[in-house]
Amino acid sequence: MKKLIALACLGFAFAVSAPAFAGSQQDKMKGCNAEAKGMKGDERKAFMSKCLKKDYVLKSDAASAKPETKPAASAAAPAAKPTQQDKMKSCNADAKTKALKGDERKKFMSSCLKG
C-alpha cells in the first residue's frame, strides 16, 4: 500500500512539475479538486489520478466550452511561451559554456534574450 501511495505521489509530482504545462495543469488541478469535493481516501486518489490525465475533460469545461472560439484563443498563447523558454535555455547554455558569473552573466543574458 505504501509503495502504491509513493508511486502515485511521484507520478503526481512529475505531472505537476512539467513547466511547459504549468498554467493549464494548475487550472486542471483546481477543476479536479472542485469535482472531487466530498470524496475521501482511495476514492479521491483514484479520481484525481484519472482527472489529471490529458484526455480527461472536466465537467465544468465540457459544459462551458465553445469549440469554435476556445481553441483559437488558446492557440496563440502557448506559441509565445516555448520561444521564450527556448531562448532562455539557449542563453543559459551559452552563459554556462562561457563560464560567465555575476554582472557579466547578467549583461550577457540581457543582451541574449533581447536579440
Image (tube, grey):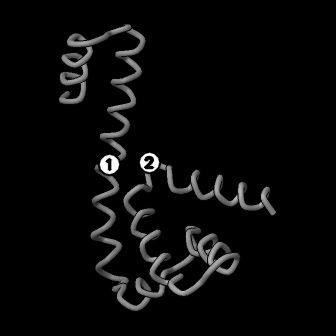
Report how many numbered discs are placed on residues in the image: 2
In the displayed structure, would residue 14 be above or below residue 23? above
**Quadrant occupied by the N terminus:** bottom right
Are there few (<14), some (14-19), or many (20+) residues within 10 Å of tag 2?
few
Q: Residue furthest top?
A: 99
* C-alpha gap between disc 1 and disc 2: 10 Å
The residue that disc 2 covers is 19
| x and y percentages locating residue 68 in the rendered image | 33, 82
Instruction: Say what secondary structure mark 1 lies in.
Output: helix
In depth, the one of 101 and 43 nearer the eye is 43
Q: Amino acid at mark 2?
A: Pro
In depth, the one of 56 and 38 nearer the eye is 38
At 53% across and 82% down in the image, what residue appears? Answer: 36
At 57% across and 73% down in the image, what residue appears? Answer: 55
Q: Which of the marked residues, 1 or 2, is nearer the chain's N terminus?
A: 2
In the displayed structure, would residue 87 be above or below residue 3? above
In the displayed structure, would residue 102 be above or below residue 1? above
At 42% across and 72% down in the image, what residue appears? Answer: 30
Q: Amino acid at mark 1?
A: Lys
| x and y percentages locating residue 91 in the rendered image | 33, 24
Instruction: Say what secondary structure mark 2 lies in.
Output: helix
In the displayed structure, would residue 64 be above or below residue 108? below
| x and y percentages locating residue 18 in the rendered image | 49, 50
**In this rendering, the label closer to the viewer, 1 or 2:** 2
In depth, the one of 34 and 23 nearer the eye is 34
Answer left or right for 91 relative to 25.
Answer: left
Are there few (<14), some (14-19), or many (20+) residues within 10 Å of tag 1?
few
Label at residue 102: none
The residue that disc 1 covers is 81
Determine the image quadrant of residue 28: bottom left
**Quadrant occupied by the C terminus:** top left
